[in-house]
Amino acid sequence: MDIQEYFSLVFSDYTLRTISLGTAILGAVTGMLGSFAVLRKQSLLGDAISHAALPGIAIAFLITGSKDSNTLLIGALVSGLIGTFWIRGIITKTHLKSDTALGLILSLFFGFGMLLLTFIQKQPNANQAGLDKYLFGQAATLVESDVWLMTIVTGICLFVLLLFWKEFKILLFDKDYAKTLGFNTKTIDVLITSFIVLAIVLGLQTVGVVLMSAMLLAPAAAARQWTNSLSKMVFLAAMFGAFSGVFGTALSASQNNLSTGPVIVIVASIFVIFSFIFSPYRGLLFRQIRFIANRRDLELQKTLAFMYRIAETHENISHPHAIKILNNFQGFTRKTLQKLVDKNYVTIDGTMWSMTEKGFETASNLYNQQVVKYE
Amino acid sequence: MDKKLAVQIDDLTVAYNYKPVLWDIDLEIPEGVLMAIVGPNGAGKSTLIKAVLGILKPIAGSVSIYGKPYDKQRSLVAYVPQKGSVDWDFPTTALDVILMGTYGSLGWIKRPGLKEKKTALEALEKVGMLPFKDRQISQLSGGQQQRIFLARALVQDASIYFMDEPFQGVDATTEIAIINILKELRKAGKTVIVVHHDLQTVPEYFDWVTFLNVKKIATGPVKDIFNDDNLTKTYGINYKVSIQE
């Protein structure tokens, strides 16, 4: 199946439609919440939470013996939340920095989870196979009820986000100030964190424990490049996330069923790379172009200013001077001279240059123009 | 004292870990003063403000604002945090930051409307930042960012203003602009409490001063207590400042 075929099938084929919808919704909700994680400088929190969910999945299976995805996700949710609150506890109760706390919990829970998984595999129970799909995810196992669950959670999340938008914003920007205004910052904090945990747990089946944090961070990091408004950033991140989900699914379905989770993550990363380079204000490319253009402008202006100082010593401003005397001025080249001629600031006659009325006028106002430009 | 007390602090002690940062502070701030809190680094100046505002939980002691606990008097108090305490690359505009000053009176869920926006624009104008209202905050200079923080507190329309180093890293023009606004606030009967570092300007800017170094060294009118004796007690070295009348 090629990509074209995918898009013609996506509306009619039940499996494809379910998976595409699921990954799109998942991408949207993780992108939305990821914006908050990124702005709070808690980018690694997602990684820790997703790894912390693994033992929950194994324990849920050991207790119930069922592989029903909802049962396992409840286990994941519980252990994800425990991991998160331990991280918070470590940060507030000890001198350890947050990266240390995150790393500790991540490896501890993940190690324990892997231990349980191998233990389960050794059991003489035919039902045990397939739990390891939570490591890297398997979008193909998504069914309609999973998508419904994602939709409901996303809906609730969106509702809460819009309701407490102002509170979320002030908590992200200035927590102490929010406290002095009388907002219970702990409640807002717990609310955001719980939603992030919920979104991550929802994505485990599709993208897996290992790559889940990329779903949270990549769309948000890409979105930040394009806008300076929080609402637009959250919206864009949701869009980027949803597109990554759909394109990732399309690519994986069209290329011999490549593993969907990793493909989605790679598509999201391409959004990031593209945004880093090509976004108009923060992007590397345009920033470099602006930098070079600015430098050229300044070089030209400095040359003009230098000529102005020579011309102003003569009664007649258009008195001709030798081009040679410009040579010991740093930044002077034939090219800049030509540009000045093109702008009609100076005229050249053989080896002599002379300033025009317009050039003199411009040069005498150069500094003021600079000031205006940067005000 | 015949004047009303704006802030009364009793036996306030704050510790981060084992070592107390503030020890048994008793402080009475009369209404309508423009007060500097001075002291060396680590003296607990910011901590004092944060403990009064309930950002930090003290180990012991109590704070009252016009005779009642802070929780009940929030609307009477505005706060200007240190400029470095937030991430200025946050995706928002100058006007948006100032609108945050209205969040307290709005309460939960309710969004700022036209009325709040008008107040915010007036505050922007007051600090001379109106042309920058839609500017992304990372594209403002340090002095402009400080003015934004000041405007945000002005929007709160409080009776008592706590400011944590509002003159830090600002140029002379901004410093003068800010002090003029502070003096205007005092003229309007407000109480302004400022953590301040530049001892030279204390007599010129303030009429009240508190010397702090973990313990309270002295508090009172600048003309009575701003002298070498108290400075030496606070900073531990022989400090000579010329006080102009």
Image (spheres, rainbow, N blue to C red):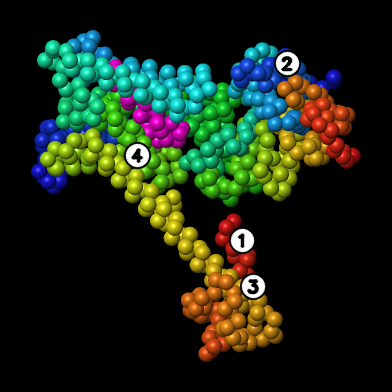
Question: Which residue position is annotated with label 2?
Answer: B24
- Direction top: furthest residue: A63
Note whether A317 is above or below B35 in the view shown: below
Q: What element carries label 3?
A: helix
The residue sitting at the bottom extreme is: A350
Residue at the extreme right of the image, as rendered:
B245
Whether the residues at callouts 3 and 1 have beta carbons within 8 Å, the answer is no
The three-letter amino acid code for the residue at tag 4 is Ala
Pointer 4 local density, CA inside 10 Å: few below 14, some 14–19, many at least 20: many
- Residue in the foreground of this view, choosing between B211 and B51: B211
Residue hosting label 1? A371
Chain assignment, label 2 = B
The quadrant of the image that shows the N terminus of chain B is: top right
The residue beneath circle 3 is A364
Query: Which residue does the image show at 59% across and 56% down from the upper left?
Result: A375
Residue A234 image point, x, y percent: 39, 37
Disc 1 to disc 4, how far (Cα)?
A: 39 Å
* Gap between marks 2 and 3 measured at Cα: 64 Å
Q: Is residue B196 visible?
A: yes
Quarter holding the C terminus of chain B? Answer: top right
Provide residue A316's location: percent of width, then percent of height.
Answer: 66, 86
- Please tell me which residue is depicted at 67% across the width and 21% down the height of the picture: B21
Regarding mark 4 in the picture, which secondary structure is present there?
Answer: helix
Q: In this view, does B183 lie above or below A69?
A: below
- Quadrant of the rendered image containing residue A73: top left
Q: Could you say which quadrant of the image residue A131 lies in? A: top left
| Residue B123 rendering spot, x and y as whole percentages | 63, 40
- Give the magenta part as a residue range: A31-56
